Image (cartoon, rainbow, N blue to C red):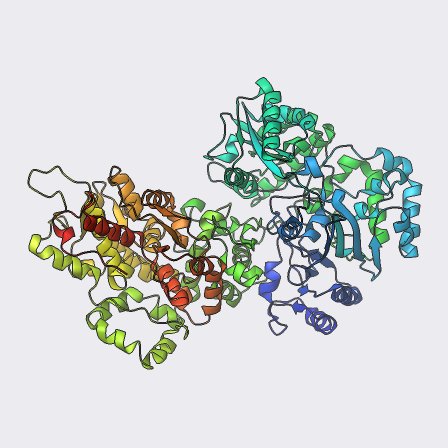
Amino acid sequence: MADLTKTRGTPDGTRELARELADAVRGEVSLAAGDRALMTMDASNYRRVPRAVVAPRDAEDVAAALRVCREHGVPVVPRGGGTSIAGQATGVGVVLDFTRHLRRIVSLDAEAGTAVVQPGVVLDDLRAAAGAHGLTFGPDPSTHSRCTLGGMIGNNSCGSHSVAWGTTADSVRALEVLTYGGERLRAGRGAAALDALPQRLRDGVRALVNGDLALLRTGYPELPRRISGYALDALLPEKGTDLARALTGSEGTLGVLTEATVALVRPPAAKVLAVLGYADESAAAEAAHTLLPYRPLTVEGMAADLVGDATGLPKGGAWLFVEMGGGTPAEALARAEELCRGAGAATTDHTVVTDPARQRALWRVREDAAGTATRMPDGSEAWPGWEDCAVPPERLGAYLRDFRALLAQHGLRGTPYGHFGDGCIHVRIDFDLLTAPGIRRFREFSHDLGDLVVAHGGSLSGEHGDGQARAELLPKMYGGELVGLFERFKDLWDPAGGLNPGMLVRPDRMDENLRFAPLPRKPVDVEFGYPHDSGDFSAAVRRCVGVAKCRNSAPSTSAVMCPSFRATGEEQHSTRGRARLLHEMLAGEVITDGWRSEEVRDALDLCLSCKGCRSDCPVGVDMATYKAEFLHHHYAGRLRPAAHYSMGRLPRWLRAAAPVAPLLNALARTPLAGAGKRLGGIAPQRAIPELATEPFVRWWSKRMAPKGPGRPDGATRSAGPTGAAGAPERPALLLWPDTFTNYLAPEVGRAAVHVLEAAGLDVRLPEAGRRRASLCCGLTYVSTGQLDQARAVMRRTVDALDPLLADGTPLTVLEPSCAAALRTDLPELLSDDPRAARVAASVRTFAQTLEEQAPAWEPPRVDRPAVGQTHCHQHAVLGEAAEQRLRARAGLDGGLSGGCCGLAGNFGFERGHYDVSVACAEEQLLPSVRGAAPGTEVLADGFSCRTQIDQLTGRRARHLAEVLAEGMAAEAARGTDGSLPEGPSAEEPPPRP
């Protein structure tokens, strides 16, 4: 968090407030535009700009911050992970960020089944600690990897297991709270807990309850997901006078939580997932409540318009995900089968999933829905606002039919899904929140839908709270008299109105403070085409809705995003944080320097351009592209960092260095290398990779010279293993001589040629000569934001390649980062050139080429375990399914590491990035390599990944092509039928490590 010296754009009088806060608290205090910009939004449609951000270290800091704010008359907003969907985690005063320091599990009593936690504890961290004792925390919203216990208590969160374990309120035992007025109290259960309150509060609560017993007993609908308003009925004597429950779900409007005692549950030892198919959404909704007598752990519903091409689902147009538990796998399976039989003729089909990996894959579809639902099938935007209303489960089918009709009446579309067993529906709707007519329709629809929910006996909020999104409509649900009681309760606890004003009582209107209001109304002039956002950079930035999957701090073997956040733990280094800063840059209110913003530049500096968010973010935020766009404008007409000249223009330097490679390799081992690294902006800890003394294209040219002249079509080709006269035509491919393979790792290119030709393929290269020598995918120019030069390089590439690929010839690219650049950056930067899209469509990886062009070819059996790194660009853009299948056929057992190697092209070489680069590698890659048994193959198709492994472990990693070429040579030496063919591919044995 920034210090107080960075105060550009702060409101008048705030510096004095910040100085007093800094004197009073031991945690960080910031007025910096970047820090405030990060807190302007949550995962809702709303935006409010805070005056300052405080990260308290303990409860004493919280008390001190409240005292200073109280003296200045400044409101306070407590904030956890910032994933609230109704706007309640945004505020105009001082935001208390609990995620930085107050994230400790104070104690865990396995015997009593309780834990004491601070408000910033991430739910998955608590679940992991409890899991060591066979316990868990029951409520589990889909944001469990980043939401905090404080936020869950503030919103009374639920999750998919609520049919078994209820809401957060059901798990809260006691709360340590500070009021805005400075009172400390412990809110627990029973009359004794009420007696322990300060007298003002004790007397006031009793008077409020005793004075309106009838209203409290009759004014609340009975349903499992009634989250809206204050739970004042929990204070009734017959309900145990449960003050902790009454404060849970109060959205930070009554007190600031500093510690909570929560109950843990013991989940069943075994779980089985039954997926029931139904003809349509209504049929699934009608059936959901009939499954509750089987005591399921979950009853989650989704329809076909949300799941897309998800595999593993039974036949149907909608599905219920029903998890059943048991003491043993057999018992859980038997209970699941019993449920499927009981579901009977209402289903179209069903499947029972016992494999944990398949269960996780299916649950990921559900957990990502909060993000994927923000895009309609045609790519148009959809937004929260009516994210989680709930009705009695038995009325869900009827409600959904009426809901769909109301959408049609207003000309809107939405994709409902959610907790069907509890009658709670999530939905994102294609509101137009950018124009006055669209906002009017949003408001009119909201009022009509509020009436509909109430008519069905429901709750305006069934999980995420009311916030600003629905609090205005609370009189529809509760009536004016009970809402007046809410106001009295608020005034009792917070007479100064200093805690999260504008929420729950006396709320701001639902159409005020919309996050899109300050954005430019016309498209911003940009370089990339942004084809998925109609060329509009603002729309691209709007993709981030704040669900914060990028804030997952746990490494994943199936995901990359977001390595820099996991390395630093800083919001500004998450994909969401960077998107927030870009949003505020476009808004121009907090960040006022536009493309010249230092705040945005600093946040993007640690973006590895791994492209992980392009695939792992549920809404497809593409921060690598946004970073390149920003750097292009930021440095326009200005001196760039040295690394942009050295690393960003690497193809140019490598081409010039090739004739003197031996001399430069020798110099790299002398003290002169240090001076060169300083001059080039390269980290001093980094060794300079050795240059190839014979680049790949030179080897190819020498190899082809005796075989005949270049083809008139602009490519050179080999005779290949079946090139005899009269032999059938072999499938042709164009092998891309990327910069890294050509100048730094030619052994990969040579090995690939041997393998591809042995598979019966006609390998070609773009014709040698001066024009070919300038061909490049443009990757290094793009990653450093030198987009004018990238475009010029790409134009030359398209000019040369398009004629060679016109007949459908695949373009085989050995380096994943270059393949990704040709597949995505090329058509998006040359969006005005249809040839670029054709070239991009032709791109194939080494494994994809073999699978498509030589499906009958059998690779050599290597039969050894493998570790290594899946290149992040491969994961995000190209996919690794073909590589996995090829490795399996070759007997290379074991999965490669997820995440990012941390070198990431120029990133890990740049001065100032070394520590983060190593931290990323230490997350998964390096431990797997160090822990590998002797004889394990270390695989990495990316040059950066191989370099990182070599420099940090001393182990040589190899491209899959090298391993297969070696295997072919070994089979030939043994005299098997995998011998190398006659012809050019037999001229030189493949290199060995």
Q: Is residue 700 visible?
A: yes
| Residue 930 in the figure: left or right of residue 735 | right
Quadrant of res 284: top right
Given residues 298 and 197, the one toward you in this image is: 298
Q: Which residue lies furthest to the front in this view?
A: 974
Q: Residue furthest top?
A: 345
Return the x and y of residue 384 as percentages of the image width and height: 60, 42
Return the x and y of residue 745 as percentages of the image width and height: 27, 61
Given residues 185 and 504, the one toward you in this image is: 185
Q: Residue at x 23, y 76 (%)?
A: 663
Query: Looking at the picture, does residue 162 appear above or below residue 915?
Result: above
The quadrant of the picture occupied by the N terminus is bottom right
Query: Looking at the picture, does residue 356 appear above or below residue 295?
Result: below
Given residues 866 and 735, the one toward you in this image is: 866
Quadrant of res 217: top right
Q: Which residue is drawn at 21% across and 63% down?
A: 695
The quadrant of the picture occupied by the C terminus is bottom left
| Residue 810 in the figure: left or right of residue 362 | left
Q: Residue at x 32, y 59 (%)?
A: 790
Total numbered labels placed on residues in the image: 0
